[in-house]
Image: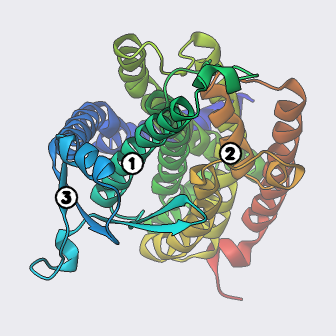
Amino acid sequence: MHRINLIFKKEMKSLFRDKKAILTILLPVLIYPVLLMFFIGFTVVVQSNLDEKISTVAVENNPPQVLIDKLNDHEKLNVVYSTNDLDSDQIDAYLSVAHVDGVENYTIEYNSTIETSQFAANRLKSVLTEYNVELKTSKLNEAGLEASTLDFVNIKSEELMGNRDDRIISMMMGMFFPFLIMLYGITGTYTIASDLSAGEKERETLETIFSVPVKRFEIIMGKLLACVNVGIISGLVNIISMFPLLYAATVAIPDININVSFVLLFYLIIMIIPVMIMTSTFFIGLGLVARTFQEAQSYGSILLILFMVPTFVVMVPDLEITNLILSIPIANALMLMKEAFLGEYSLIRTFFVLLINLSISGAGIIIMNRLFKSDWVIFGGE
C-alpha cells in the first residue's frame, strides 16, 4: 500500500500541475449558476408569452349561439368563422360540431407538438366543459328537476404531490442532475486516463518507473486510484455546485418534491464510486494499447460514447425500475440516483447495483493488469 500510495501521489501531483485539467474539473462551479439562471429566465419568459398570447380558433359547422357567445367572452380566444383570409399556420385550433340524436358532438383539432396549439385546445376544452354544465342544468330545470337530484355520488380529488407544474419540475430535476453528475464524472476519468497510460509511453517515463523496485500491479493500482480520484472529484464538484441551487429552488418553490440532504449527498457519492472505477479501468486499459497520447484519446472517445449510451436511460420519462434496468451498468446507478433525488431509497436495490458495478470493475482491473504485464503491449516490437 505504501508503494501504491507513492504512485498515486506522483500522478496527482502531475495532474494538479496541469492548469487545463484543474479548469476542467472546476468548470461546473462557474457555469452551473449561469446555466440555471438562463434556464429559469428562458422558461419564465416562454411561459409568460404563452399565457399572454391570444389563441386564434376557427369555428365550423355553426355551433349554438350560446357557445359562440361564451367563446367570444373568453379574453384569450380570437374566434374566426371563415378561414379563407387566414393561413393555416395562423390558426391554433379548429372547433367543429356534429348533431347526433340530439347530442352535440364537438371535435377539437390541434397539434400537440406546438405549444400555442396545445394552449388553444386547453382553452377550448375549459369553455366546452363550462358550457356542458350550464346546458345540462338548463335542460334539467326545463324538466322540473334540479341538477343536484341526479348526483348520487360526490367525487372530490385532492392532489397530494402539489400541482402538476411542480411535479413536472421535480421529475425533470430528478432526471437531469444525476445525468450531469455521471456525465461529468465519466468525462473526468476520460481526460486523465490517456495521460496515465499512453502519455507515459509517449514521454518514455515508464522505463524510469520500471527501474525502481515496484511491482507492475502496484503501479497500475496507483494509476487507477489517481484516475478514480479525479472522476470522484469531478462528480463531487458537480454535486457541491448544484446543491446550493437545488436548496434555493426548494425554498423558492416549497411544493417541489426534491429531497436535498446530507443523506442524498452521501448516497450519490456511494453510487458514482463503482462507476468511476469501471470507467477508469477500461480507459486506462485501452490507453495501454495505444502508442501515443493522441491515439489513446481517439480510442477513448469511442469508448466514451459507449459509456454515455446508458446514461440517457435516466432521461426517459416514466421509466420503471425493472430487473433488466438494474442489470445494465451505469444506467442502474443513475436510476437509483434519480429515485434518491425524489426521496426514495431501496437497500436491496442499492446492494444489487453496487454488486454488479463492482464486479464489472473487478473484471476490468484484471484485464488492465494483464495488459500492463505484457512487454509487447507496453513497449511494442517483438
Q: List the residue tagged with mark 3.
A: 79
Q: Quadrant of the N terminus?
A: top right
Residue drawn 53% across the image and 45% down it: 179
The correct choice, above or below, for 34 with respect to 193 in the image is above
Amino acid found under the numbered disc labelled 1: Asn
Type of amino acid under label 2: Val
Secondary structure at badge 2 equals: helix
Q: How is the image coloured?
A: rainbow
Picture residue at 73% right of the left edge, 63% below the top? 372
Residue 262 visible in rendering = yes
* Mark 3 and mark 2: Cα distance apart in space: 57 Å
Q: Taking 267 as reference, is 258 left or right?
A: left
Tag 2 residue: 275
Where is residue 342? Give x, y as percent.
62, 26
Side of 57 where 78 appears, left or right: left
User: Which amino acid is tagged 3?
Assistant: Val
Relative depth, front residue between 312 and 72? 72
* Mark 1–mark 2 distance (CA, rounded to whole Å): 45 Å
For the C terminus, which image quadrant?
Answer: bottom right
